[in-house]
Amino acid sequence: MEAQKYEEASSPRKEYIGRLLTVILFSVLSAAGFGFSIYLFYVANSIYMIFLAIFFTMLSLFAGFFNIYASIWYFRSYFYTGFLKKITDGLKPMGTPPKVALVMPIYNEDPEMVEKNLRSLWKMDYPKGKLEIFVADDSTERSYMERIEASCKRLGVTFVHRSERKGYKAGAINNIVYNYTDAPFFAVFDADERLTDTNFLKDLLPYFQDRKLAYVQTEKRYAKGTFFSDCVDIFDAFFFKFIQPARALDNTAIFAGSCGVIKRSAFLEIGGFPEYIIEDTFFSFESDMHGFKSLYVQNVYALGRPVRSFTELAKMQWRYNYGDTQFISYYFQRKGYKKRKTPFSVPNYITHGLGLNYISIFLILFTVASIGITFTAVPFAHIDIFHFLQTNTIQLDLELLGFFAFTLSLLTPALLTRIYFKSWSKGLMVFLLNYALAFVRTKAAIATAINRNPGIHWNKLKYAGFSGNVLSSLRNTGAEVAFASLMFALAYFAFGQSNIAGGIWLSWYGFLYMLTTAFLYKYG
């Protein structure tokens, strides 16, 4: 089996203690940030300082909540293996195999890749007479459409083309399930996903002995590629390694859009996929609303194509953040959601909708707060180099404490990456990508709020073996360049005022926000 297996960090006891210590660490860091906020109130001697203290306190409270909740997800995911084993051990052998439809939605995809991955689906270890494959094609490129249709004829795959792309991917899948198949179960695979474990259906279908189960989701990963694409794989793996298992304990596991099986009767009762840009999140919530169960199996059965460029990653993140912002509005407007599961059900949905927004908008707001703190009149903001180097005056300065508490909480992915993926460098890259994508995500959230979706209009500047263009990179990331330039200018001014701590702080932020331009230049 080609699936990428979960690597145990250590013995179960050490693993448990390590995760518990992570919760404590996040709690301490959050408390440190809040303590710094209290200190700002203590030294406030003007309306400006009071406003700044209120602003920083609000940010600290929200950041603390998300950081602690993320650590709780990480801790609770430890228990999922035992939870799933109990369910698996109670299953009976599957009887007569039911008919299953495999649906591959495509939109202007590489015809060669599509044919290759369709061939992999036919290798499924399942009675061929009980298997049907559909390509739900919304392509606008006629040459692509014709080549893919020809491939489908050769492979015995049903090709369905829609001239109007109504409802995005959700509309394409709904069209197949409602109009072209009566199979009691169907699975979704994206066009870039190649089946690597042919036991997919044999492993997952027995779980549907639970009549209330609506879908089973599996772990999604990318195939091995470059250093950058492998970092993106880890970037997404945190969700599937830690968040999905913890959510599954509360029956709020997300159907992740592909590599999962759905029961048709439940699908119809739910009303199909809600036709939003991230249909999977909305469908998962509606499944829970209708009283169905969900399950997550932490095995990899298919590998997606590696993310080849920073532009591709930025577009993915734009889509996720735009859709998550839509979801949080939908969630609060949806009437009748009963808090009937566990104490974590409601915060699971809220944090999912706000998660990427928090990571992006809060990074920027913390940076703005840092500017205000750097240029206040509080005594600790002005430490010249001579006092800084004298050990008898060096203290755990609260300005530095506030900075390091927040930074260390974001550097935690680097430590977890080292533990679970054996790489410090990739962990650091995961941390840096959050800053590089901060403005992209924020602009997506704003676009949702004003009901617009201008999207990302960057030109793909490079693929492996080609240099990027500096001027194009700067032009495409104008907002990030302007913000980073402001940080460097203010840092220069702070150094000129002998404010060493503030100058270092703002220079660090300037470097982080210039990463968008640097990554676009390097990775295209």
Image (spheres, rainbow, N blue to C red):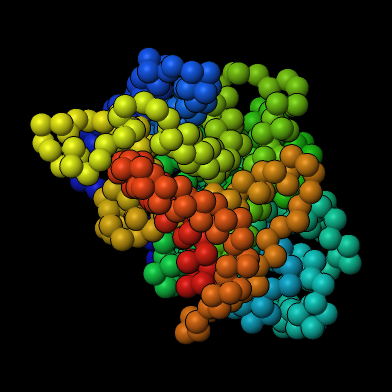
Residue 287 in picture, x, y percent from top left: 67, 35
Residue 431 in picture, x, y percent from top left: 40, 51
Locate residue 395: give its quadrant. Answer: top left
Question: In the orientation shown, which residue stands out farthest toward the right?
Answer: 163
- For the point 61% across and 73% down, the residue is 472
Q: Is residue 98 visible?
A: no
Q: Is residue 166 above or below residue 406?
A: below
Q: Is residue 431 above or below residue 32?
A: below
Locate residue 15: give its quadrant. Answer: top left
Q: Which residue occupies the foreground of this view, 49 or 241? A: 49
Question: In the orientation shown, which residue stands out farthest toward the left?
Answer: 392
Q: Which residue occupies the foreground of this view, 297 or 396? A: 396
Q: Which residue occupies the foreground of this view, 422 or 90? A: 422
- For the point 78% across and 68% down, the residue is 137
Q: In the figure, is residue 274 to the left or right of 351? A: right
Q: Is residue 247 visible?
A: yes
- For the point 51% across and 56% down, the residue is 485
Residue 130 in picture, x, y percent from top left: 66, 61
Quadrant, the N terminus: bottom left
- For the point 43% across and 72% down, the residue is 225
Q: In the figure, is residue 25 to the left or right of 30? A: left
Locate residue 118: give its quadrant. Answer: bottom right
Q: In the figure, is residue 357 to the left or right of 381? A: right
Q: Is residue 461 above or below residue 101?
A: below
Count the marks: how many? 0
Residue 524 in picture, x, y percent from top left: 54, 73
